[in-house]
Image: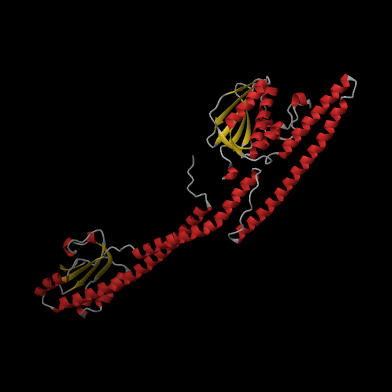
């Protein structure tokens, strides 16, 4: 399982992006400040070192040789060490910048001393300098400024200044942390202003998708979000009116169809020929069954209010009724399974599944399983199953794998359509799969809670 590090919610994403932008900008500023400050510090350090070295050299050259050790010891410190050394065998290597500083230093010396070799190293390694020429207790890992100038014909001055480690820019770090906290808080406020209307829009869309009537979404937030809410409210209003008109039309059609069917049943009683009367009654019954199935499938969900029921008790009651009617159906008991649903629709859907199992698979075995977030009503039979290529097609209206077009053997082709409509109207679904030992297994999935109420 791959770990997803990027946040999925808009609020956290906006905070993360804003904080990252502040971090990057502060790092850039800190880097620029560090480079600029380093250059300024380097120039200031060089000036101070040269001034100090010039002052010490001038002082030492002006006093007797026997007094120089005391003066050098007095002028030495934790970061400075002045030591008298013999004339070096050869000058140490220097860069062009260091050579220029050496010439500058030679300019303050007497003319005779200017011809002697002078060494200036700005980044000397302490491990390459004699230990007695280093300040007492210095850290040999840090760099040093090393200056070697003549005091007289045979004696030279070794001046070593240890570079102190640069401190972290605490002010910049404090400012960066403060900026991240402030901008993250501001980003959270802005994100919530955008995300809250979107959350309400999502909840309302979920309610509408399940066939419920969602209240109008409050039209607030930025223009883009507010315009989306306005468009959604208009769409919902139009869809609601269309569905209401459709239900009203279906109700009227259903009433208009039932009236002539009832009249035809009455007229059939006056048909004297038994064979003709029985044939017409059979056709009329098929017509009435088809009408009821079409109306039920077209109405779908939404006509019945949801309420909390025990799914286990509901399915067990249905199975008991079918068993009393002599249907080969068995039930595997289950503990109470509370769900929020439209009970009559669930009962109709389960009945269709059981009747299909009996019709095509000789028997039906019914049970309920707990799927964590909800329940599955499982109906198994011992029939031939359904080929994989046909498992999606059988949910389409009037599709029958039995091609005789006889309602007694192939049904109306609306049973699974109605089951799918009811399951999806409750936020669930229907899955068909063939059993390894033969037969078909149908799993009707229902959520544990009413998603529309959340």
Q: Locate residue 232 relative to residue 159 in the image: left or right.
A: right
Which residue is nearer to you in this view: 282 or 183?
282
The image quarter containing residue 43 is bottom left
Which residue is nearer to you in this view: 2 or 9?
9
Can residue 355 be seen in this snapshot? Answer: yes
Q: Is residue 133 above or below residue 418?
A: below
The image quarter containing residue 296 is top right
Which residue is nearer to you in this view: 131 or 33?
33
Q: Is residue 54 above or below residue 423?
A: below
Query: Residue 386: image x %, image y %?
Result: 67, 27
Q: Locate residue 82 relative to residue 350 in the image: left or right.
A: left
Q: Locate residue 58 relative to residue 171 in the image: left or right.
A: left
Can residue 154 be seen in this snapshot? Answer: no
Which residue is nearer to you in this view: 112 or 177?
177
Q: How many marks?
A: 0
* Residue found at x 28% / y 63%: 165
The image quarter containing residue 287 is top right
Query: Residue 149: image x %, image y %?
Result: 21, 72
């Amino acid at each position: 399982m791959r770990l997803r590090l990027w946040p999925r919610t808009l609020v956290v994403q906006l905070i993360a992006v804003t904080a990252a932008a502040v971090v990057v900008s502060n790092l850039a500023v800190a880097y620029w400040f560090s480079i600029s400050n380093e250059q300024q510090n380097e120039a200031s350090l060089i000036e101070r070192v040269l001034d100090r070295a010039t002052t010490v050299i001038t002082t030492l050259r002006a006093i007797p040789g026997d007094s120089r050790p005391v003066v050098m010891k007095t002028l030495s410190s934790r970061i400075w060490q002045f030591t008298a050394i013999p004339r070096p065998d050869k000058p140490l290597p220097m860069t062009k910048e260091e050579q220029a500083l050496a010439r500058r230093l030679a300019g303050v010396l007497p003319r005779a001393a200017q011809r002697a070799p002078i060494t200036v190293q700005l980044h000397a390694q302490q491990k390459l300098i004699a230990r007695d020429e280093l300040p007492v207790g210095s850290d040999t890992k840090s760099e040093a400024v090393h200056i070697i100038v003549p005091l007289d014909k045979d004696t030279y001055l070794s001046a070593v200044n240890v570079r102190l480690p640069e401190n972290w820019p605490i002010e910049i770090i404090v400012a960066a942390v403060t900026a991240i906290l402030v901008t993250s808080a501001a980003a959270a406020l802005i994100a919530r202003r955008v995300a809250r209307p979107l959350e309400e829009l999502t909840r309302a869309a979920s309610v509408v998708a399940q066939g419920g009537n969602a209240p109008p979404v409050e039209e607030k937030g930025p223009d883009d979000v507010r315009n989306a809410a306005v468009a959604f409210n208009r769409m919902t209003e139009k869809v609601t009116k269309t569905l209401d008109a459709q239900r009203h039309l279906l109700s009227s059609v259903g009433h208009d169809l039932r009236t002539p069917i009832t009249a035809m049943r009455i007229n059939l009683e006056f048909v004297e020929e038994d064979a003709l009367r029985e044939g017409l009654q059979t056709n009329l019954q098929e017509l009435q069954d088809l009408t009821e199935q079409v109306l039920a499938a077209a109405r779908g969900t939404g006509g019945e209010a949801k309420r909390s029921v025990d799914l286990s008790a509901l399915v067990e009651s249905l199975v008991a009724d079918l068993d009393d009617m002599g249907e080969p159906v068995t039930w595997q008991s289950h503990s109470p399974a509370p769900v929020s649903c439209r009970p009559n629709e669930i009962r109709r859907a389960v009945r269709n599944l059981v009747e299909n199992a009996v019709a095509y698979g000789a028997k039906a075995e019914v049970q309920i399983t707990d799927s964590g977030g909800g329940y599955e009503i499982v109906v198994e039979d011992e029939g031939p199953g359904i080929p994989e290529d046909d498992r999606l097609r059988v949910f389409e209206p009037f599709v029958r794998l039995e091609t005789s077009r006889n309602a007694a053997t192939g049904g109306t082709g609306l049973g699974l359509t109605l089951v799918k409509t009811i399951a999806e109207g409750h936020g669930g679904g229907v899955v068909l799969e063939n059993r390894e030992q033969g037969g078909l297994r149908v799993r009707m999935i229902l959520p544990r809670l009413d998603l529309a109420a959340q």
